[in-house]
Image (cartoon, helix red, strand yellow):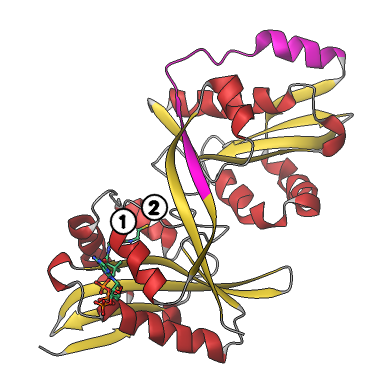
Amino acid sequence: MSISIEKYKDSYFLEVLNLFNENSEFDFFTEELLENKLNGDPRWNPETTLVAKIDAKIIAFMQGVEQTIRGVNYGFIKLMIVSKELRRQHIATKMYLQLENYFREKKTDIVRFYDTPLNYYMPGIDPKYTPAVCFVQKLGFKKFEDSFNMTVSLEQDFSVENELKFLEKEAIEVKRAEENEKEELLNFAKEEWELWQNEIKEAYKNEPIAVHIAKLEGKIKAFSLHSANNKGLAWFGPMGTHADMRGKGIGSILLKLCLQDLKNQGYKTAIIPWVAPTAFYSHYVGAQITRVFWRYKKELN
Ligand SMILES: CC(C)(COP(=O)(O)OP(=O)(O)OC[C@H]1O[C@@H](n2cnc3c(N)ncnc32)[C@H](O)[C@@H]1OP(=O)(O)O)[C@@H](O)C(=O)NCCC(=O)NCCS
């Protein structure tokens, strides 16, 4: 049996989609979702996206992306899958080592698995995928943190009329963002949340624009958005409120406006991914932690 590893081509898309759906134990990809993870990622690079083949049949896939964050060069393995009946034959290891060599040549400092900002499928490895945990440990990766997603029921009342009246008294306007506010929002977010620029741009592509903002004296001070990443999975976030404006209930209103949008689209639940303020989401909308991920890294330099 001869296995070849080669670079991904667009013509492989449907075969790779089937490979994921026939071999992922706990997840499912739509065309839209996989497209979003591949070409939809601004860091998309066919040089670091590999398939393994036996004759003409694709039997494995691994995608790498690179990004410099605060002066550190990261390489990420963002997605990987090996056909079930061909596991434990070091196919994924060979693909990984090819990418690791590429990352080393590019002076990558750290490699991580799955938790790639901007455009990610999962913020780490879900330990239910136990072979994946064994695999990264064998490659010398060390676990450094947990991350988690929350799930929120959309079968609840998200009306915010009373809260909005209170904010009006403070001259704070809350509204759906408009096209002519995009530049201001990108600049506002850049100061504290530079890594969220791509998600803002993606959320703006929805109809209606999937972004809500709060303004004080005509200036944007807070935002929330949805459907920027993992479209079709009712994906909330990110959101942010300027430090001077916290504690006024703005965040909870912006959160509820996004959840109402998703409810209007017919979803029954939404995902609040890669959460930091657990208590905030638990308190205001009864969100629950439903999926935990382990984050792994390996230093190359
Ligand atoms: C994780 C995955 C890509 C590994 O692919 P693979 O080609 O089978 O991996 P390899 O053969 O290169 O394994 C390398 C090493 O990893 C470890 N390993 C891999 N699978 C293992 C398993 N099921 N049990 C124990 N160790 C395992 C072993 O140490 C193995 O080396 P060894 O066989 O010499 O002992 C594959 O299991 C897979 O496709 N899983 C589903 C996708 C997935 O988990 N994605 C992550 C979602 S968060």
In the rendered structure, does residue 154 fall within the stretch colored magenta?
A: yes
> CB of residue at label 1: within 8 Å of ligand 1?
yes
Of residue 271 and residue 141, the one placed in the foreground of this image is 141
- Quadrant for the N terminus, please: bottom left
Q: Is residue 173 left or right of residue 79?
A: right
Secondary element at tag 2: loop
Q: Is residue 89 left or right of residue 30?
A: left
Seen at 71% across and 13% down, the residue is: 163
Amino acid marked by disc 2: Asp
Residue 8 seen in this snapshot: no
* Image: magenta residue range: 147-169
The residue to which callout 2 is attached is: 126
Q: Is residue 171 above or below residue 243?
A: above
Of residue 293 and residue 259, the one placed in the foreground of this image is 293
Q: x, y percentage for residue 149? A: 48, 41
Q: x, y percentage for residue 59? A: 19, 74
> CB of residue at label 2: within 8 Å of ligand 1?
yes
Of residue 178 and residue 122, the one placed in the foreground of this image is 122
Q: Is residue 41 above or below residue 259?
A: below
In the rendered structure, does residue 230 fall within the stretch colored magenta?
A: no
Instruction: Estimate the spatial distance between the alpha carbons at disc 2 and disc 1, rounded to whole Å.
Output: 6 Å
Other-residue count near label 2 (Cα within 10 Å), few / some / many at <14 / 14–19 / ≥20: many
Q: Is residue 259 left or right of residue 265?
A: right
The residue to which callout 1 is attached is: 129
Ligand 1 falls in quadrant: bottom left
